[in-house]
Image: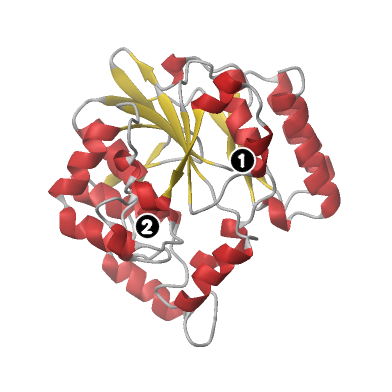
Amino acid sequence: MDAVITWVDGSDPAHQAKMAPFLGADKKTPHSAAATRFANCGEIEFCVMSIIRFAPWIDNIYIVTDSQQPQFYASITDPSLRKRIRIVDHKELFKGYEFALPLFNSLAIEAMLWNIPELSEDFIYLNDDVMFIRPTPIETFRADDQYVLRGQMKKRKTGLWWHRLKTKLLGRDEMSRVSFRQLQENSAALINSDSLYLDLPHCPHILNRKNLKSLFQNNLEIFRQTICHKFRHAQQLWSVSLFAHFALAKNLAKVDNRCKTLNIKANAYNKNKLSLLFNNAENGQEHYFICVQSLDMAASQEQAYILEWLKKIILDGA
C-alpha cells in the first residue's frame, strides 16, 4: 500500500507569479488563496519521515507538487529510501486533463489522485500538515475486509437555500470562503439522499484508486467543474468525502474512532496549552496522528516549540 501527500511551497516566487494572473484585476486574494494555505515551514519532512518511522508497511510515498521539490529530498542519501519517495508533478497528475492547469486548489488536485502512475490500488492520503506520531498498524485503515474510516455522523444543514441566506446575512461573497462542512455535504449528496453525512476529521485517509476513477468517470461533468476551479469554490466536491460515503453506502467501510488526531491550531495556542496537549498525547494511547494547522502564522516561540516537539517524536531516535 502506498501513501500520497499533496504539498506546495507558497513562498516560491515562481509559484506566486503563476498564481498572480488568476487573482483578478484588483489582485485581491480570496480566502481560498490565503498565503497560509500554501505556506511551507518544513512540515513535509516530518510528514514523510513519520510515515517511514511509524507506518513501515507503506511502500512508496508520492509527493504531489507543482514544479517544485521539497528541500529535504535533495539531502536523502540512502538509495532505498530515495527510491521509495517519488515526486509527482501536476502535469503528470493531470495527464489527459491539462486544460485545467495551473491549479491552486487542493480539491481539484485530490480529484485526480487516481491518475498517479503505478499507484497502489488502496492508498493512504494525507496533507503535509498531518503526521503519524506513534506506531500505526495497517489494520488502522483496513480490517476485516473493510476500509476503516474516522468521523462523526451529522445532520445535513447547508442546502442551497441555507448557503444563500448565510451569504446574504453575513455579506460574504460565495467564492470567498468555502466551509469544510459544505464540501462534505455536497459530496454526500452525490452518493445518497440520506439526511446524515460523515464529518471527516483532519487525519490520514484510506482511498481506493479504482473507485475514485469510477466515481470521476461516472460523474464526468461534475468533476470537470471541480477540477476547473483555480481556487476552492462552494460548488466543488471533495473526493475524500465522496469515497467515504460511497464505501459506506456499499458496505465496504466501517467507522472506528479509536485512533484519534491531535489537532493543533498553531496560531491560536500558547506554549502552556501546547505543552499540555503534547504531554497528553505522549502519555496517552489514543492519539496516533497530529494535524498542525497554520504553523506559519504562529508566534516565533510557539512555532519553535512545535517544531522541536515534532523533531523529538518523529526524527530523534528514528
Q: Is residue 12 left or right of residue 236?
A: right
Which residue position is annotated with label 1? Answer: 44
Coordinates of residue 7 in the picture (x, y in percent): 53, 47
Q: Is residue 73 above or below residue 169?
A: above
Q: Is residue 47 left or right of residue 91?
A: right
Task: Categorize mark 1 by other alpha carbons within 10 Å: few (<14), some (14-19), many (20+).
Answer: many
Instruction: Determine whether the residue tagged by mark 1 lies in a helix, strand or loop.
Output: helix
- Mark 2 and mark 1 lie on one chain; the one further toward the N terminus is 1
Q: Nearer the viewer, residue 257 or 204?
A: 204
Q: Residue at x 26, y 63 (%)?
A: 225
**Residue ranking furthest to the left:** 218
Q: Which mark is residue 182?
A: 2
**Residue ranking furthest to the top:** 144
Q: Is residue 2 left or right of residue 195?
A: right
* Distance from Cα at disc 2 to Cα at disc 1: 27 Å
**Residue ranking furthest to the bottom:** 25
Q: Is residue 183 in sight in this rendering?
A: yes
Q: Quadrant of residue 99?
A: bottom left
Q: Residue at x 41, y 72 (%)?
A: 175
Disc nearest the viewer among 2 and 1 = 1
Q: Quadrant of residue 107?
A: bottom left
